[in-house]
Image: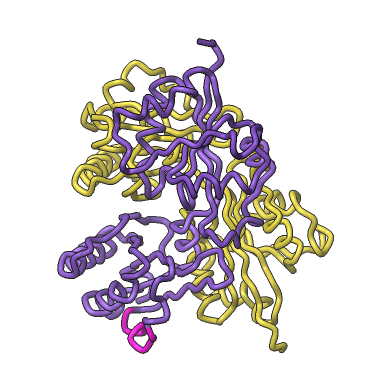
Chain colours: A purple, B yellow
């Protein structure tokens, strides 16, 4: 045991595996911090490797340990994940895309690290939630992120109505995500159940050359060919008030 | 009139005027984009100048036009603000701190720019909302940002109860801000009105060497000397569930 305090660095990842946004991503502080790490905690092996490939690391890539942490990790394994940090090492944590601990279960890791008096430092980078909010033209003074909607159509439509009501009553933009192969179905349900004057935004392929952001009242969405958004990573926003 | 399409770039600003986080901030893509702009739309003159000083711009700083846009800007002036862009120029938009269009009224500008078929591009950078969420250890899979609470003590305490209820019922982290000189009063009210097992986080002086993030159950906050947070820029988070 050493008295040296271990560190947990929260690193952003690119939003796309295509690497299109790498150039917008590398800051001097991030490059320096990744150069310092002894290992990486990652949501997946591929995610961890694709992150480290962008940087010069202390050990050669094949000698750099990757430890998995994701929604399947049992709570009792978190101590094991943090063990090297408790011995004074510095490790990074990356999710498969965007910011760690946002729209993923990383908070548990941070909570345990803080309890163990490890130093936790967050670095910023792309987030589809923030980029879509900035580009939507929707209310950015009050907003909520709600994760995935229900996969069952009937429940999903119920949830859409609930979110529209929250947007109306709390004067806030409601943000949610969906598995890309269900984009078309989700948009059809939005057009079906939401008020015609509610604004609906879809942001697709953010930070790539194919980036598309469409912000329109529900009634204006009706003429759009929805099939072109099939299987493209997307995020959705509803704003009851701003476009009326 | 030219056929060249104008562009609106949404730029992040540092969180602090001390410039402590500048190094974590400069990406190749941001440096290139700022080099392209013909003028800057800023929340304040000081904010616009302190932003541009970090970069090499096309025109010398004293020749670079700064156009103000903030909560006092009447809606009918937005056309005037966008006029050079309609002639094909590229302008940036910066808030005084953090991401534009998040926790500020910039959305109106983006809305109008999109309606006028201008190209809008968002760059990312520090955001106290995201950094605090990542560092809090609170639920990042569902969260809401609520802006400022009421300045009247009684109304503020009512709002705190409402937010705690939303955190409880929607299983979401509730985030809000306060004018720094009211930090102590706000923390006192939180300790007074919130459930003892609700988790309360305050993140102070983010991205500076004085950065402090405290995440504790309300009952554990009771022994802390609150006066040390007086007048330090801070953001607050409530999570009913995660620390029970």
| Side (left or right) of B51 relative to B70 | right
Q: Nearer the viewer, residue A200 or A16?
A: A16
Q: Residue furthest front?
A: A62
Q: Nearer the viewer, residue B103 or A103?
A: A103
Q: Residue at 63%, 41% (x, y): give it.
A: A30
Give, as a single range, the part of the protein colored magenta: A218-225
Q: Does residue B43 show up? A: no
Q: Residue at 43%, 70% (x, y): give it.
A: A232
Q: Nearer the viewer, residue A178 or A222?
A: A178
Q: Residue furthest right?
A: B60
Q: Quadrant of residue A162?
A: bottom left
Residue A52 vs A237, above or below: the answer is above
Q: Does residue B52 show up? A: yes
Q: Nearer the viewer, residue A207 or A218?
A: A207
Residue B172 vs B42, above or below: the answer is above
Residue B112 vs A7, above or below: the answer is below
- x%, y% of residue A219? 32, 84
Magenta stretch holds residue B142: no
Magenta stretch holds residue A220: yes
Tally of marks: 0
- x%, y% of residue B64? 77, 63
Which quadrant of the figure contains the C terminus of chain A?
bottom left
- x%, y% of residue A136? 45, 68
């Amino acid at each position: 045991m050493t008295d040296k305090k271990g560190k947990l660095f929260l690193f952003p990842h690119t939003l796309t595996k295509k690497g299109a946004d790498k150039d917008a991503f590398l800051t001097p502080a991030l490059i320096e911090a990744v150069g310092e790490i002894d290992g990486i905690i990652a949501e997946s092996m591929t995610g961890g490797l694709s992150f480290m490939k962008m940087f010069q690391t202390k050990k050669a890539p094949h000698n750099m340990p990757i430890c998995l942490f994701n929604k399947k990790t049992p709570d009792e394994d978190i101590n094991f994940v943090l063990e090297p940090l408790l011995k004074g090492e510095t490790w990074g944590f990356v999710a498969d895309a965007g910011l760690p601990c946002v729209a993923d279960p990383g908070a548990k890791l941070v909570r345990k690290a803080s309890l163990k008096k490890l130093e936790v430092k967050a670095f910023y980078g792309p987030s589809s939630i923030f980029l879509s909010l900035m580009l939507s033209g929707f209310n950015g003074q009050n907003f909520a992120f709600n994760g995935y909607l229900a996969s069952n159509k009937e429940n999903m439509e119920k949830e859409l109505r609930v979110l529209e009501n929250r947007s109306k009553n709390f004067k806030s933009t409601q943000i949610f995500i969906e598995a890309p192969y269900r984009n078309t179905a989700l948009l059809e349900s939005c057009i079906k159940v939401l008020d015609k004057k509610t604004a609906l935004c879809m942001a697709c392929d953010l930070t790539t050359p194919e980036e598309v952001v469409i912000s329109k009242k529900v009634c204006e969405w009706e003429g759009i060919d929805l099939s072109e958004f099939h299987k493209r990573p997307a995020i959705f926003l509803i704003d009851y008030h701003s476009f009326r």
